[in-house]
Image (cartoon, grey):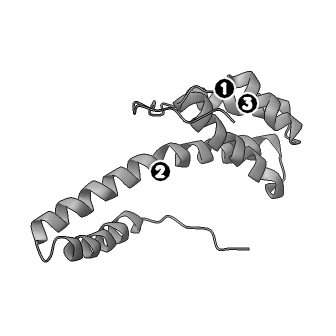
Amino acid sequence: MPLKKQRSGTTNVRYRLKMYGVGIGKAVGNEQLAMEFAIALSEARAAGFQPLAQAHTVVEDTCSKAGVPRGIWGIYYAFANFYVSKVLTYELYTTDEAVNHFVKLGADAGILNDLANRLSGVTFPVATSGAKPKKG
């Protein structure tokens, strides 16, 4: 089983440093441009990661309160990722369609509905770019 990525207090700083090194190579030594490049990428990365981190916190809280064994939290993490992406961000599915899909995969409907209610209360960015992904 591959190691999971861990986030710590220095994750963003390490990422920015790594991207600065890439930027120096691309900008042929222009330090100002490399720094702008690194800052822009690290901010975009943080903005993209934050909604899923919030969703995973909601899953952990809900599953632990419901007494779900940690070994099967994965399906609820998958539901949270699906719900944030396909229901809240791109509006490709309704909540009922998402819940029914994961019930067929073996998840508990009550926990899924609780997760959906709690995730709907969290503010996530709505997609504003042109093309929506296809349903499915």
Left or right? Give the position of 128 relative to 26: right
Q: Which residue is mark 2?
A: 49
The quarter of the rendered structure image containing the N terminus is bottom right
Mark 1 and mark 3 in contact (Cβ < 8 Å)? yes
Q: Which residue is mark 1?
A: 93
Alpha carbon of mark 3 to alpha carbon of mark 2: how far?
22 Å
The residue shown at (65%, 32%) is 135
Give the CA distance from mark 3 to mark 1.
6 Å
Residue 128 image-quadrant placement: top left
In the rendered image, which residue does mark 3 sit on? 98
Q: Quadrant of the C terminus?
A: top right
Which mark is drawn over residue 85? none
Which percent across, then down, holds residue 7?
50, 64
Q: Residues within 10 Å of mark 2 (few under 14, many from 20)?
A: few
> What SS does tag 3 mark?
helix
In the image, what residue type sits under mark 3? Ala
Count of marks placed on residues? 3
- Compare residues 106 and 34 and report the one nearer the observer: 34
In the displayed structure, does residue 30 sit left or right of residue 131? left
Disc 2 from disc 1: Cα separation: 22 Å
* Pointer 3 or 2: first along the chain: 2
**In the depicted view, which residue is nearer to us: 103 or 56?**
103
Residue at 59 percent of width and 42 percent of height: 55
Residues tagged 2 and 1 counted as in contact (Cβ below 8 A): no
Q: Between 9 and 47, which is closer to the camera in this rendering?
A: 47
At label 1, which amino acid type do we have?
Tyr
Query: Taking 86 as reference, is 20 left or right?
Result: left
Mark 2 vs mark 1: which is more N-terminal?
2
